[in-house]
Amino acid sequence: MDGASSAESRLQRDFLKLKQSISKGDIVDAMLESISILERSRSKEERDPIIEALVRMERALHGTGDPAFVGTELRWCVDRLNAASPGSANHGICLLNLAAWHRNRGETMMSLSTHSDISLSHGHPNEVVGLSRLEVSRIMANLGDLDPAMRHLWSARQCLSDSGMLPEALSASLEWLDLALEEVDSESPRMSTRIVEAVPRSDPGRSWVASNPDDVREIVESLMPVLLSDVSGKERRDIGLLLDAAEALGEESWSKEVSRLSAEIQDPRVLDALQS
């Protein structure tokens, strides 16, 4: 290994240590250490524009500079990574952070616009695309635009499942089911068709398409083994959704499967639903 390669690897290792410190909550020490790493990433000996952008992103997110320039700094990081490593996980994470910053400021359309730059076709990995679609679905649901919210949740669930991000995929499934049970119609198109036939719109509206019972069945049957593996807890709205789905589709077997565990269920509302 030559000198340049060894220097680069040392910088990368030090950056990973910085990330570990942040994940442990050692923010003050991490931000102090970030100054040295940032200077090294700009030096002739260890120059690394990707690490420079990532360190600047962390510093912006943790409030080391003027709050008025956080957005500008995050945008700089996105642009730098788009030039140095387009479609990478790091580029996608920067976009996610910039989109979240816009949303926290109430800039909904800017947040959606930023999320639109995250795509499998751009090379972003499944996990980043899944997290983006999950966030977009929540924005759409808050706007009352429920048809695209359901489509994004369905896509998020698939991407997150493929990435092994099972807790996040579970959240996407439950949020989809919660919306889907508003209206179930056997004449409605399947989600796969709705996704393929969706057309871009310039602005969100307020739209609704009833769910197809086969999609509801697919989601419920994937959820039941997970949710019923542990039915403890006094607030189990997720199990309540299974019972709502059973009633909507007339699937008595689902209710019986939940009833079989009634002695272990602690949520009084679920128990009341089983007895009604």
Image: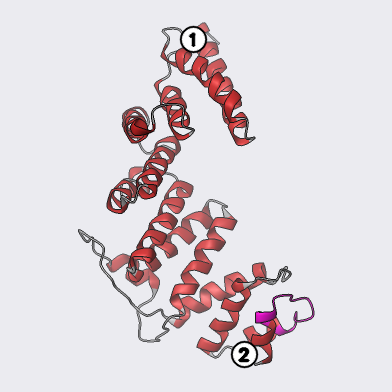
Residue type at mark 2 is Glu
Q: Name the residue under label 1.
A: 4
Seen at 40% across and 46% down, the residue is 100
Seen at 37% across and 39% down, the residue is 87
Work out whether mark 2 precedes mark 1 in sequence or the reverse, and give the earlier one: 1
Could you tell me which quadrant the N terminus lies in?
Answer: top right
In this image, 239 relative to 132: left or right? right
Question: Start and end of the magenta stretch?
Answer: 259-270
Residue 230 found in image quarter: bottom right
Residue 5: image location, x then y, percent: 51, 13
Residue 106: image location, x then y, percent: 34, 51
Disc 2 to disc 1, C-alpha distance? 67 Å
Q: How crowded is mark 1: few (under 14 residues within 10 Å), some or many (20 or more)?
A: few
Could you tell me which quadrant the C terminus lies in?
Answer: bottom right
Residue 60 found in image quarter: top left
Q: Name the residue under label 2.
A: 252
